[in-house]
Image (spheres, helix red, strand yellow):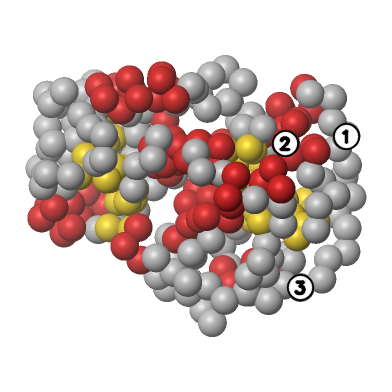
Amino acid sequence: MNYSSVAPWFIIITVLAALATLQNACGRAELADPRTSILMTVDTLAAHLDDPQLVILHVGDAPRDLEAVLERHGISDDSRIVVYAAGSSLTRAARVVFTLAWAGLGDRTALLDGGLGAWKAAGHAVTDEIPAMESGSLTLNPRPRLVVNAEWIGRNSAEPGYALVDARNPAFFLGEREDRGKVGHIPGAGSAPGSELTDESFRLKSAEQLKQIFHAAGVEPGDTVVAYCHIGQYATLALFAARTLGHEVMLYDGSFQDWAQRDLPVDTVAAF
């Protein structure tokens, strides 16, 4: 089945290794905390490399049909998926994680905290070999509600229970730099820059630090976080961080590029 006409992605994932479902320490019953259920440490991954049904995804670049791609890389209905970023490509990895959540695989997908850099720094082995893999059998269960458009933003983003956040650099948010011919941000949005959500090693900041960032952006406990950025990539890192705090999330996939092309109003005054 081809979901490419509706699925929100700009990138493709390629497998570095395909192995097995994380059990025991990585089982669903033991992953009640939102942060630990979707953010994995290198030590946890290293301890479970030999578990059956683990699929590890390395982030790459070209668009294709999602279901066929995932099956070709060994992902099945019972797979547990770990996505990691190579170098500083954390927002691309976050986009992959979001795409998998859109496809209905969010409760079985985790992001490796610190990515490949953290894996190497911890002394774990790397390889340039890609093992042969058996195609998986996957039935996607898309969650279209995770993606919204400009019309939805105009109707709903200011409603109680929703918090609109801008994941771009503060200079764009405040109108100090131009973006797609406009200066400022979508009215009612708070600022939660993707660049401020991780430390210098590309590890996600602590839960308390993230709570402070989102609170400053106008996010209250229980809010659904709706995020945008330039083109829908940095926003997925903000959404991932929000998920680790237990928030429901939505992505304005067209982001500021779409908003500006529609010549919709912007604001330069910080609301929070």
Task: Please give left or right for residue 272 compared with residue 44 in the image.
Answer: left
Q: Position of residue 124 (x, y in %)?
A: 84, 31
Q: Position of residue 256 (x, y in %)?
A: 27, 44
The amino acid beneath tag 1 is Ala
Asked whether residue 246 is in view, the answer is yes
The amino acid beneath tag 2 is Thr
Q: Quadrant of residue 178?
A: top left
| Residues at marks 3 and 2, CA–CA distance in whole angstroms | 26 Å
Q: Which mark is residue 34?
A: none
- 162 or 188, nearer to the observer: 162
Query: Crowdedness of circle 3 by 10 Å Cα count: few (<14), some, many (20+)?
Result: some
| Residues at marks 1 and 2, CA–CA distance in whole angstroms | 14 Å
Q: Quickly name the residue at label 1.
A: 125
Q: Quickly name the residue at label 2.
A: 44
Q: Position of residue 151 (x, y in %)?
A: 16, 59
Q: Position of residue 71 (x, y in %)?
A: 68, 71
